[in-house]
Amino acid sequence: MGILESLKKATEQATGIARPRKQELAEFVKMKKPLEFRFKDDGLVPNHPFWPFVVYRGRRKVGGTI
């Protein structure tokens, strides 16, 4: 790790700049129940009889990216 990166990390730890706020942290931890859909076989798209189509609601912003 270079000198600049070490200095940046030490500054972030001392000031708490890079840490999420309490409200943001709670959003990261809160689990949302995924939506599950089961479709009848229409002959066009292969559907597994036991595995549903799962949709996870919302996005999580991690490390400044979406």
Image: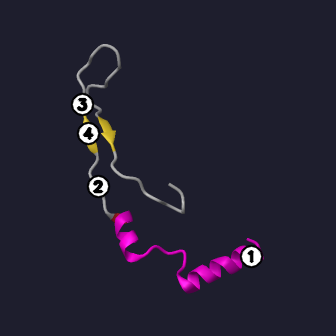
The amino acid at mark 2 is: Lys
Image coordinates of residue 10 in percent, x first then y, are 64, 82
Residue 48 picture quarter? top left
Is 18 colored magenta in this rendering? yes
Image coordinates of residue 52 in percent, x first then y, are 28, 34
Circles 4 and 3 in contact, beta carbons < 8 Å: yes
Mark 3 to mark 2 CA distance (whole Å): 19 Å
Q: Along the line of sight, which residue is nearer the eye, 5 or 64?
A: 64
Mark 4 to mark 3 CA distance (whole Å): 7 Å
What residue sits right under mark 1 in the picture?
4
Drawn side of residue 36 relative to residue 61, left or right = left
**Which of the marked residues, 3 or 2, is nearer the chain's N terminus?**
2
Which stretch is magenta?
1-28
**Element type at mark 3:** loop
43 vs 9: above or below: above
- Mark 2: few, some, or many residues within 10 Å (few <14, many ≥20)? few
User: Is the stretch drawn in magenta largely helix, strand or loop?
Assistant: helix
62 vs 50: above or below: below
- Mark 3: few, some, or many residues within 10 Å (few <14, many ≥20)? few
Q: Which mark is residue 32?
A: 2
The amino acid at mark 1 is: Leu
Mark 1 to mark 3 CA distance (whole Å): 52 Å
The amino acid at mark 3 is: Arg
**Element type at mark 4:** strand
**Which of the marked residues, 4 or 1, is nearer the chain's N terminus?**
1
What residue sits right under mark 4 in the picture?
36
The amino acid at mark 4 is: Glu
Mark 2 to mark 1 CA distance (whole Å): 39 Å
- Mark 4: few, some, or many residues within 10 Å (few <14, many ≥20)? few
**Which of the marked residues, 1 or 3, is nearer the chain's N terminus?**
1
